[in-house]
């Protein structure tokens, strides 16, 4: 795609329809998740297919199907399904409970919020889901606040911050998978770049939480844990960092979690099969969403909508830094509109890839910028699922959590600093190696 083409603004109408349905229903009903996102995408895709009467309907359907069936999208869907199976398998055999209880047993009683944040970081990194982390830890945060003078809003902000840490970095997080696949890089390499960007934010968050709650103590109920049940999470983290293909990583994790559950009596053989199926089913919406968005974007691209967007976004870009800010702005605005960081990356990813290619941006950086910025915005929007769930558990307003949302703000600041300074520095030969990899090798 050439960035010199001016494109066609009307081709973006399906995007407008989607945002109107999604945001409009949220404003009217007060619930931004009331209108099924799949229905919104189907309606928007239908609008895309009836546009451009110069082309036959059959031809546009063929374009849609080719876009939806793109090899990168199909690989992304397979990873989604395996990640869902692993997450369900590990949770079903007690890995989440054991991880939480083990972490609570080693948390210093005078650094409760710091400990809660770090626990949330590790659990979300292991589970690959911010929502699952919040559901598991928000009640513990409420319990800590009930026993101390720590505000509920601060406790929930600590949980949400830690949850967004893993959502941004985990090898099995849907946001990471989407960022890596749309930019054509490796998960391990993206993790390294991403980790250097957000680590300062995590450290500063710990310092702030420590200062705010210094000397506060509470008696936390100590529950039993089994360190063996934590091994599947450690296995996935270690094998992924070792550079093993992500399919093998997840397959090993599923088998390991299933075997442990079978040996300790948590699972029968049929339980293992059913749990894996239920985990995959939990990813159906995300998978179909990726497929339908890819098909819709292909039609919009064919009609000139993507060229129009790229022309507007890149019109005033004169440098690589400007291009990186353009990518950050694209995914940030998309996340503000959709209140879903995975959707925002899937939508903005192809545009970001074109900008990155045009301005010579390393795919590891573009993937990291997409993920960091989307998670920063997602952790700050009061109508996003993360804040709504945490606020619901604590029975407070999501707005009250925002003044304590240090980590989402700090990772946004770190992203800006990383763009301005070009940090972290990457070796040219590694970049060339990454760019020349085949689609299959890019998965690992």
Image (cartoon, rainbow, N blue to C red):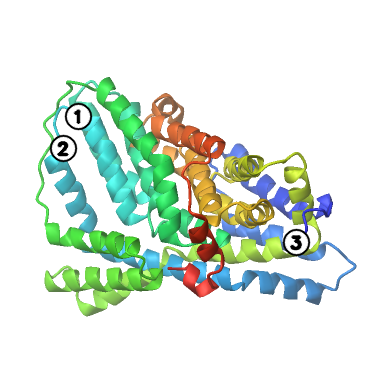
Q: Is residue 382 visible?
A: no
Mark 3 residue element: loop
Q: Where in the figure is residue 221, as x and y percent of width and height?
A: 11, 39
Mark 2 residue element: loop
The residue identified by callout 2 is: 107
Q: Specify few, some or many for label 3: CA neighbours under 10 Å numbering under 14, 14-19, or 20 or more.
A: few
Q: Where in the figure is residue 394, as x and y percent of width and height?
A: 33, 33
Q: Is residue 299 above or below residue 190?
A: below
The first of marks 3 and 1 along the sequence is 3
The image quadrant where one finds the C terminus is: bottom left
Q: Where in the figure is residue 65, as x and y percent of width and height?
A: 68, 73
Q: Is residue 311 above or below residue 429?
A: above
Given residues 219 and 346, the one toward you in this image is: 346
Q: Specify few, some or many for label 1: CA neighbours under 10 Å numbering under 14, 14-19, or 20 or more.
A: many
Tell me which corner region of the image, top left, top right, bottom left or bottom right, holds residue 197.
top left
Instruction: Determine whether, in the image, residue 437 is placed left or right of residue 334.
Output: left
Tally the numbered discs. 3
The residue identified by callout 3 is: 1
The first of marks 3 and 2 along the sequence is 3
Tell me which corner region of the image, top left, top right, bottom left or bottom right, holds residue 362.
bottom right
Q: Residue furthest bottom?
A: 269
The residue identified by callout 1 is: 111
Q: Residue at x 34, y 51 (%)?
A: 132
Q: Is residue 274 visible?
A: yes
């Amino acid at each position: 795609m050439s960035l010199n083409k001016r494109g066609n603004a009307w081709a973006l109408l399906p995007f407008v329809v989607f945002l109107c349905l999604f945001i409009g229903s949220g404003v009217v009903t007060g619930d931004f998740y009331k209108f099924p996102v799949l229905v919104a995408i189907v309606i928007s895709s239908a609008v895309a297919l009836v546009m451009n009467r110069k082309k036959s309907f059959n031809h546009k359907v063929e374009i849609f199907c080719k876009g939806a069936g793109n090899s990168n999208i199909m690989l992304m869907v397979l990873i989604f399904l395996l990640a869902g199976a692993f997450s369900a398998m590990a949770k079903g055999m007690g890995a989440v409970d054991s991880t939480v209880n083990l972490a609570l047993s080693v948390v210093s009683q005078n650094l409760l919020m710091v400990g809660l944040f770090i626990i949330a970081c590790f659990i979300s990194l292991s589970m690959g889901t911010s929502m699952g982390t919040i559901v598991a830890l928000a009640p513990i945060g409420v319990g800590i606040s009930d026993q101390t003078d720590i505000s509920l809003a601060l406790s929930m902000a600590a949980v949400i911050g830690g949850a967004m840490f893993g959502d941004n970095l985990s090898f099995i997080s849907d946001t990471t998978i989407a960022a890596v696949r749309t930019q054509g890089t490796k998960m391990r390499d993206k993790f390294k770049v991403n980790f250097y960007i957000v680590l300062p934010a995590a450290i500063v968050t710990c310092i702030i939480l420590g200062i705010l709650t210094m000397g506060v103590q509470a008696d936390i109920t100590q529950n039993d844990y089994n360190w063996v049940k934590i091994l599947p999470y450690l296995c996935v983290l270690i094998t992924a960092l070792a550079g093993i293909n992500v399919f093998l990583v997840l397959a090993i994790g599923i088998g390991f979690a299933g075997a442990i559950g079978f040996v300790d009596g948590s699972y029968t053989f049929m339980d293992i099969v059913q749990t894996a199926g239920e985990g995959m089913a939990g990813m159906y919406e995300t998978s179909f969403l990726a497929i339908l968005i890819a098909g819709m974007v292909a039609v919009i691209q064919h009609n000139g909508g993507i060229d129009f967007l790229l022309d507007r976004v890149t019109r005033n870009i004169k440098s690589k830094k400007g291009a990186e800010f353009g990518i950050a702005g694209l995914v940030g605005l998309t996340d503000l509109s959709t209140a879903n960081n995975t959707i925002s990356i899937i939508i903005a990813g192809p545009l970001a890839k074109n900008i990155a290619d045009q301005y010579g941006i390393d795919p590891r950086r573009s993937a990291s910028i997409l993920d960091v910025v989307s998670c920063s915005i997602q952790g700050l929007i009061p109508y996003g699922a993360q804040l709504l769930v945490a606020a619901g558990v604590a029975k407070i307003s999501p707005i009250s959590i925002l003044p304590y949302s240090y980590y989402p703000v700090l990772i946004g600041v770190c992203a800006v600093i990383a763009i301005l300074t070009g940090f972290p520095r990457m070796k040219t030969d590694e970049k060339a190696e990454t760019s020349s990899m085949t689609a299959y090798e890019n998965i690992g």
